[in-house]
Amino acid sequence: MAVPAVGPEAWGMRRNWPQWIGYLTALVSFGYGVLGLYWSLGGAGFPFGVGDPTMVESGRDAIAGNLLGFATPEPTGAVFAVAGLLGAILALLLTRGVGRGPARIAFITAALVIAFALTIVIQDYRPLIVVAYTPILTVSKLLFGWPEGVGFGDLYQWPSLNLLILQLLGIAWILTALAYKRRTADACGNCGRDGHGTGSRLVQWGKPAVVVAVVTPLIYCTTRWLWALGFTLGIDAEWYREGQENGLWLAGAALASLGALGAVLTLGLIQRWGEVFPRWMIGLRGKRVPPMLAVVPATVVAMLVTSAGSMYIRMAFVMGVEDKWVTNMPETLWPVWGAALFVAALSYHRRRRLACGVCGRD
């Protein structure tokens, strides 16, 4: 099946992503496989299990924090080496459009399984922490010099960055599978249109998805704000005092405020100001909001909160919730938040997309 021709206006990194995303996925997968081989042979820097200070400190509860909490370099590194090599081969096959019929279904399924493993299964909350606390720490350090004794080196630790890299690789695998699906279905690689009409009901789910994506994080935010205001809310009194002394509750309130800001911005997916820049935005007011300006951040946040929430669900099963209900249970709702935000972003994108600049289809 032929892919619609790509005109001169389509040559660019953004519009041309279906042509290069698979090669990038293959390259990074192969590179990570080489790292796995290096670790299996005794190389330094193994970022999981015994090489992860956070997991070591967790002791017997490490498996609750991360499924690789007890991992050791030799077998785990070898698994990553094999997976990286096979993954690179699969990504190249997808990029070349190889496979029809059952083989096509098998290739797409394999790519999505890899993506799920990288973005959810082996993840915990640290990629979210890195992304969320980067602006918080930047502002608090520049304006207030707070918190004392804590810097970006504490935030950007190798095990945390490694998980973030793997999560981004998982997103690349999703895009690789999507590009392959379109390529082998005679659809436009850039927009997915095949000339037969969308017939999608996705737009109808936009408003309900936004409501869920706004309300769910506010449950978490409320608990963090109450702690910062002096309400123990079920926390042990001694631990609460320690949190006050080391600024833990203020840090939590800052993260909650960032989440609340995200909830407010989510409303833009169904509001006029999410389509046209409002008047107070000097230089931009009245101009059309590029859809991807909202879709990309919403999709990334959806992935981050879903993986973090999955960790808290695992902790609830492994460690129980008797004395953790107020600290951990609101986070178990995050996968609901992530799913709703993802659906809302897709609905917004489908509703606002214009004629494709590559295939010209409406």
Image: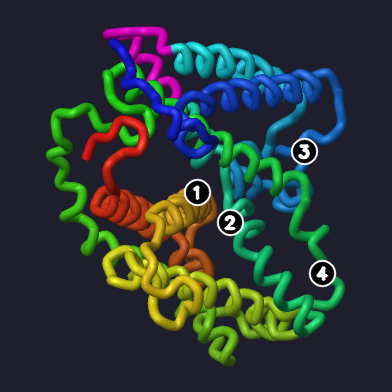
Q: Is residue 96 above or below residue 144?
A: above
Q: Nearer the viewer, mark 3 or mark 4?
A: 4
Amino acid type, label 3? Val
User: Callout 1: 10 Å neighbours few (<14), some, many (20+)?
Assistant: many
Nearest the viewer among 33 and 300 is 300
Mark 1 in CB contact with mark 2 (< 8 angstroms): yes
- Residue 144 rendering spot, x and y as whole percentages: 77, 84
Amino acid type, label 1? Ser
Q: Is residue 303 above or below residue 106?
A: below
Whether 139 is among the magenta residues is: no
Residue 181 visible from this viewpoint: yes
Q: Is residue 107 left or right of residue 76?
A: left
Amino acid type, label 2? Leu
Which residues are drawn in magenta? 97-113
Q: Which residue is mark 4?
A: 150
Residues under labels 4 and 1: Cα distance? 25 Å
User: Callout 3: 10 Å neighbours few (<14), some, many (20+)?
Assistant: some
Residues under labels 4 and 2: Cα distance? 18 Å
Mark 2 in CB contact with mark 3 (< 8 angstroms): no
Q: Is residue 207 left or right of residue 251?
A: left
Task: Tell me the element at label 1.
Answer: helix
- Which badge, 4 or 1, is on the more N-terminal residue? 4
User: Who's the residue at 28% across and 35% down the image?
Assistant: 360
Q: Which residue is mark 1?
A: 307
Give the label on residue 50, or none.
Answer: 3
Q: Nearer the viewer, mark 3 or mark 1?
A: 1
User: Who's the residue at 60% across and 49% down the image?
Assistant: 65
Residues under labels 3 and 1: Cα distance? 22 Å
